Amino acid sequence: MAKLKGNLLYGQSGGPTSVINASAYGVIQEAKENPNIEEVIFMQHGIQGALNEDLIFLKDISEEDVEALKHTPGSAFGSVRHKLSDFREDDTNYLRLLYIFKKYNIRYFLYNGGNDSMDTCSKIADYMNQVDYECYIIGVPKTIDNDLPFTDHTPGYGSAAKFIANTMMETSYDMLAYPNGKVTIVEIMGRHAGWLTASAAIANVSGFGPDLIYLPESPFSIDKFKKEVSEIYKMKRQCLVAVSEGIQNEEGIFISSSSGLKDAFGHFQLGGVASKLATTVSADLGLPSRSVEFGSTQRAASHIQSLTDVNEAIQCGKEAVKAAVAKKTALMVVMERVSQEPYTIEYKLHSLNACANTEKKMPKTMINKNGNGVTKEFLDYVLPLIQGENTPLFSNGIQQFSKIRK
Amino acid sequence: MAKLKGNLLYGQSGGPTSVINASAYGVIQEAKENPNIEEVIFMQHGIQGALNEDLIFLKDISEEDVEALKHTPGSAFGSVRHKLSDFREDDTNYLRLLYIFKKYNIRYFLYNGGNDSMDTCSKIADYMNQVDYECYIIGVPKTIDNDLPFTDHTPGYGSAAKFIANTMMETSYDMLAYPNGKVTIVEIMGRHAGWLTASAAIANVSGFGPDLIYLPESPFSIDKFKKEVSEIYKMKRQCLVAVSEGIQNEEGIFISSSSGLKDAFGHFQLGGVASKLATTVSADLGLPSRSVEFGSTQRAASHIQSLTDVNEAIQCGKEAVKAAVAKKTALMVVMERVSQEPYTIEYKLHSLNACANTEKKMPKTMINKNGNGVTKEFLDYVLPLIQGENTPLFSNGIQQFSKIRK
C-alpha cells in the first residue's frame, strides 16, 4: 500500500465530557510516532474552525499543555454544534472545506463527538469520496450519555458515572444525618437514554444509594411515583430518588417540558423535572422534599475521573490515527467487550453512517420489572467502567488545565 | 489538680460538613490516650440521642470504621437541629440530661457544631454548673459557612471551598467550549455570610473563574447586576456568575424569597436565586443563560477534601479533649492564624457563650469596591485553607464510608 504523507486535522464537537481531551492526547501521541503524519492541526470549535481557517498547530502547543490534556475537562480546542447541510443540496461549506483540506494538505481527518458529530463526519467523508480527494476520515466516539450504537460504551460515560455514583453516596450520607429526613430528588442528565441516571445505582453497592431510579426508557406516571415515594418514606423516614431529565409520560411527553411557570418578573420559566417532582411530593404527599441537579459538573468533573475511562479515551484517539493511516475511512472507532472477567476491550471500527443520528437506549433486561431501578445485568455492565482513579493535577489546591486556545 | 475519671460524651449537630467526622476521629484518638477517660460514648443525632438514651459506645465500633471517619462526609453519628429551652423557664430536658450524665458517669461533654450547636452546648454548661455536677464541656467548631466568630476559620470551610473552587474551574472550562457561550449563574450556600461564595474566586487564580461574585454582605441590585452581566457578555460572549443564596436587596429582603411562582400542579414554589436571575438575564437582556446549584454536594464532597482542613478538624477534636481533661469548661476550640508564611495555626479556647448565636460576616476589606468580587486580602486568607488533598478511600471505584449508626 502506497504511503500517503500529509497532515492530520482533528476537531471536537458536541457536549464536552471530562475525557474528550484525553482522546486528543491519544491522537497526538500516535500521530507523533507515525512518519506519514507531518503535522497535527486542530480546528478551533470543531468544523467551524475549519470553515473559518481558525486552526492551531501542534508545534505551537507546549509539552506541558499536551500532558495536561489527560486531566482537562470541557473542550480544550473548543466545541461547536453545527449541522452540515446535504452537499447535494448546498455544497458551499464543502467547497470551503475542500479548499482548506488542499491548502493544508489534510489527508487524515478525525472528528471527536457524539451522534450529531458522527453525522458531520460521515457527510464530509461522503463528499471527499465523491470529489475524489484522498483523505481518510475517522470518528472518535465521545458522550457522557453513552447512547452511541455499535460500541459497548462511549468514552466520557465512565467518568460521569463515577462522579454520579460517588456524589449519590455523599448525597445519601448527607441526607441520613437527620432522624427525619427528606425526600431528595436528584436530576441527572442523559437526554433520551437512561445510562447516566442508572449509574446512580452503583451507590447502592456501598449501601448509600437511591431508593428509586426513574429512566426515560420506562414511561413515567406521577401517581405511581407518589405511591412509591410514600411507601419508602413510611418505612425509612427518608427517600432518595434519581430521575433522568428525559423521563416521559405514557404519551411520550417530557415531564420537564414547559409548565406555565412564571417568576416574580413575569417571565416564563422552564422547570427542572426534579424541582417539579419535589414540589409535588411536598404538596400532594405533605412530605419535606428538596431537589438537586448535578448539572454540568456531571460532564466536567475532571477531579474524579475513572482511570479506565481516561485510558480508553486515549486509546480511542490512538486507534483512530492507526485506522486513518491504514487508509480506512468513513468509520468510527468502537469498543467491544470481549471478556467480563477480566474486563477486556477490543477496539474495532464501524460504519460512520450507521453510527450517526442513532441513539442507543438501555435494554429492558437492565431495568427492573417495576420500572424504578436497575438489574444486576446493568451493574455488571457498568462497574468495570468506573474502576481506577486518574489522580488530578493539583497545584496550590486547584487543578491544572491545558491552556491551548488562542 | 485532682484527676477526674469518667466517660466522654460526644455528639454532632447542625448541617453536616465533609470533615465533621474527622473531628470525631481526633476526639477518639486523643481520648484513647488519656487515662482519665474510660469510655467514649456517642449520642446518635446529637442532643436528641442523649435525651433518648440512644447511644453508641466506642468499644462497639470497628477499627476500620474509626479510620474511615477521616473520609466520611455527613454526620456519621447523626445530626439534629434541636434548640434547648432556657433551663430557668423549663428544665425538663436538663433534668433528663443530668440523669443520663450521672447514669453513664459523663464527666467530659463535647459538642461538634456551628452557631446554634454552641448555644446548646453553652446552655448545658450553664446548667451543669448551676446544679454543681462536675462535667467539663467544650465545643468543637464546624460549619461550611465559616461564620463562627473568634476563630480564624472553621473546619469544613476549607474542603467546601476547595470543592467550589475546582468545580467553578470545571464549570468555566465547560462553558468556554462554545464560541457563543451562555451567562451561567452558579448558586452557592453560606446563609447570611459570603465566605463560601467568595471561595469561587479561587478559580480565577487558574484563569478559569467567575466574572462576577455577589455576596450577602453587599446589597444586591437587579439593575446593577443586569448592567454588569451585559457589559461582560459584550466583551467575552460569555459570563460566569457566582451568587450567594443569601443575597439581599437594599431593604434586606432576600432575592430568593418566595416569588409567587406556581407550577403545573398549581402549587407555590420557592425559586432558587440563580434560576431566578438566569430567567431575568434571558428575558430582560435576551442572552442565553442557565443556572447551576452546587447544592448539598458543597458540604458533602468527601471525594475532594482539603488535607489542611481534615488535619485541622482532627486537631480541633483533639484540642477539645485536652481542654476538657485539663478541667476547662464552657469554651469552644478556636484557631488563631499566627503566621501567614508559612501558614501556621495555634489552637486556643474562647467562651462558648460568646460564640453562640453570632454570625461572622466577611469584612469590607475582603470585598471589592464594586461589590461584585473579592480583594487580594480574601485570596491570601483563603488559599492556605484548601491546600493538600486527602486522597479518598476508593474501593471498586467508589468511596468507603464509616457504617457506625444502628
Image: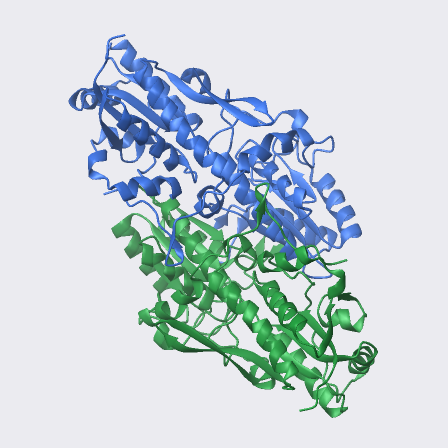
Chain colours: A blue, B green
Instruction: Let me know if residue B154 appears in the view.
Output: yes
Q: Nearer the viewer, residue B155 or A359?
A: B155
Q: Is residue A50 above or below residue B12?
A: above
Query: Vertical placement of A310 versus B224: above or below?
Result: above
In the rendered image, residue A156, in percent from the top left (x then y), is placed at: 46, 35
Give the residue at x 27% y 16%. A135
Pick the residue in front: B346 or A139.
Answer: B346
Task: In this rendered view, identify the residue nearer to me: A257 or B350.
Answer: B350
- Residue A315 drawn at (x, y percent): 41, 28
Q: Quadrant of the N terminus of chain B?
A: bottom right
Tell me which residue sits at (54%, 38%) in the image: A387
Report whether B58 appears left or right of A329.
right
Quarter of the rendering containing residue A85: top left
Give the left or right position of residue B266, taking residue A104 as reference. right
Please, is residue B156 above or below residue A195 in the view? below
- Give the x, y percent position of residue B301: 54, 55
* Residue at the (41%, 59%) spot, across then down: B242
Which residue occupies 27% across, 20% down?
A: A108
Label tally: 0
Left of A125 or right of it: where is B355? right
Residue A92 or residue A156, whichever sits in front: A156
Q: Residue furthest top?
A: A1
Viewer can see residue A88: no
